[in-house]
Image (cartoon, rainbow, N blue to C red):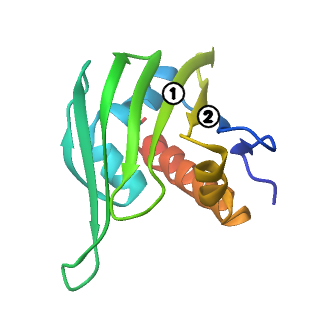
Amino acid sequence: MERKTKVHAEEGKQEIFITREFDLPLELLFKAYEEADIVEQWMGTKVVKLENKQHGGFEFETSDNKGNVVFRANGTIHQFVPNENIIRTFEIMGTPHGIQLEYLHFESISPEKSKLNMQIIYRSVKDRDALISIGVGMAIGIDMAHNRLEKVLSNLQ
């Protein structure tokens, strides 16, 4: 089965591009990044903080069955334009991957369809390659998350 989310990483570059068309109206797609309870559902993680404004921030945390934190990510929101753009940093705590800069652009294709375009920039080609070295697993994981996003939001329509 072909993945709906496309991940493109050009050799020798510090960036990756992620695109996905959703069978969702633009406003509903944007809510998946704007409302904490929806983020928690499709990302499968706890939203500790989500301040959707310029110089706002976010923090996500996932724990195992015993309550031990196994994943923590945070960042700063540099631009937040509803139904259009989010520019933010993203850092996975406790890993050597470093901070990435993410440009998320949301666009309407039709009243029932929208598209997410992401450009993620890393400090170096080495940092980018370390994250994409998990190869197909990364692309599959992003596609699975986007599939959950579409399913969660479809249930809200």
Q: Nearer the viewer, residue 149 or 61?
A: 61
Q: How many marks?
A: 2
Of the image marks 1 and 2, the number of the one nearer the N terminus: 2
For the residues labelled 1 and 2, the Cα–Cα distance comes to: 18 Å
In the visual, does 2 lie left or right of 115? Answer: right
Q: Which mark is residue 139?
A: none
Note whether 119 is above or below 148 in the view shown: above
Q: Amino acid at mark 1?
A: Leu
In the visual, does 153 lie left or right of 24? Answer: left
State the image coordinates of residue 115 (x, y, percent, origin top left): 62, 27
The residue that label 2 is drawn on is 23
Q: Nearer the viewer, mark 1 or mark 2?
A: 1
The residue that label 1 is drawn on is 104
* Element assignment for label 2: loop
In the visual, does 92 lie left or right of 102? Answer: left
Q: Residue at x 42, y 23 (%)?
A: 86
Q: Residue at x 72, y 62 (%)?
A: 135
The local crowd at label 1, few if under 14, some if 14 to 19, many if 20 or more residues have their Cα within 10 Å, is many
State the image coordinates of residue 77 (x, y, percent, origin top left): 31, 28
Locate residue 139: give its quadrant. Answer: bottom right
Q: Nearer the viewer, residue 6 or 54?
A: 54
Note whether 70 is above or below 74 in the view shown: below
Locate residue 130: give its quadrant. Answer: bottom right
State the image coordinates of residue 120 (x, y, percent, origin top left): 57, 36
Q: Nearer the viewer, residue 87 or 108?
A: 87
Of the 4 image quadrants, the one containing the C terminus is top left
The local crowd at label 2, few if under 14, some if 14 to 19, many if 20 or more residues have their Cα within 10 Å, is some
Q: Amino acid at mark 2?
A: Asp
Of the 4 image quadrants, the one containing the N terminus is bottom right
